[in-house]
Image: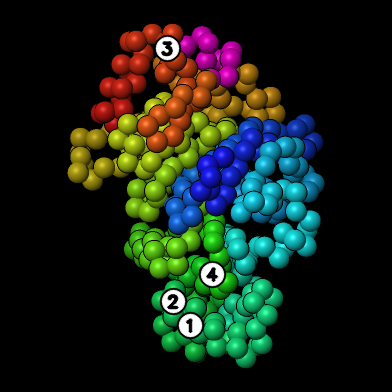
Amino acid sequence: MQQESLLHVENLVVDFKTYGGRVAALRGVGFDVAPGEVLAIVGESGSGKSVTCQAMMGLLPVPPGRVVGGRAVFQGADLLQLRPHELSALRGRDISMIFQDPLTSLNPTMTIGDQIAEVLVKHRKLSKKSALAETIEILRLVQIPEAERRLSQFPHEFSGGMRQRIMIAIALACRPKLLIADEPTTALDVTIQGQILELLKNLKRDMGMAIILITHDLGVVAQIADRVAVMYAGQIVETGGVFEIFKSPRHPYTVGLKSAIPNPSLFGSHELVSIPGSPPDLFSPPSGCGFAARCLVAMEVCGSYPPPVIQTPSGYARCWLHHSYAPADLAREVAIERATC
């Protein structure tokens, strides 16, 4: 655990009980978030990104979800060991979350003003009048025009981009130390997406808060992240600084994600390469590397034994290719693919 960490997650294990058996959704997830840092958690759908944050926040549906083990230490307190009322007091005050779909996350029967003021009344003990006055300033902070008039409007009266700004306003009402943004730009067009990302960058700079950004879009990561954690099949397979992840990815899965990014500068000559195959069946997780069946440079050991954790300049990678006994030609192949994708 890094001494300066705001959040330290260690060996987080989560499963879901279903009619078909138990699904190993998270298999030993761990990472750190420093104060004022933006950590992007990336990976394809179903890799465990959202489940990781829902488990930390106590938002998993129980049943079928269950936290089997691990720790999530926030400012010295293990979130997984807190009583429900203690976790409820912390959510919204010190840790806030922006969900994927703002329309379904907002209450359609309450005005925008009441929904934001509710957070201020609960956590900061403001009067209703003071909370509404503060709400106007928060709406201005997230760049919603005519804030006073907007207080009495309902969610359906706003565009998708404006609803996302309102979700951000609710999350920022108590000036949290950590903001979790779960796919905050997925349903938005490119122009609005850029505005939301710019807003998050400015708020992070002005308020000094840390951000966990959950996304499958490496283009978004490049614009805002300081560090990246790449998830696959319920595990983090590579971490590192954003420059290192883009310039010198160590894990073949990260290389595959990078090669699927459209590059306008290479229009007409750059072929997007999809990753063949499908993720493993987490009803019966593989004994070795989860990516082995889809990896073009997999060795026999990859499918049989868990890969070692290899330290990199700014993080680590779980991959047998970087072991001292791995064939040099495979390491070169990955390096060439890394440089050309």
* Residue named by callout 2: 141
Compared across the picture, whether 332 is left or right of 305 comes to: left
Whether the residues at callouts 1 and 2 have beta carbons within 8 Å, the answer is yes
Q: What kind of element bears circle 1?
A: helix
- Residue identified by numbered label 3: 324
Q: Which sits earlier in the primary sequence, circle 1 or circle 3?
A: 1
Determine which of the numbered discs, if any, sits on residue 175 in the image: 4
Of the image marks 4 and 1, the number of the one nearer the N terminus:
1
Amino acid type at image mark 3 = Ser
Alpha carbon separation for disc pair 1 and 3 = 57 Å
- Image coordinates of residue 317 in percent, x first then y, are 46, 28
Residue stretch in magenta: 298-307
Q: Please check the rendered image and state whether residue 300 is part of the magenta-colored stretch, yes or no.
A: yes
Say which amino acid is labelled 1.
Answer: Glu
Residues packed near mark 3 inside 10 Å, few (<14), some (14 to 19) or many (20 plus): few
Q: Position of residue 323 (x, y in %)?
A: 44, 15
> Label for residue 137?
1
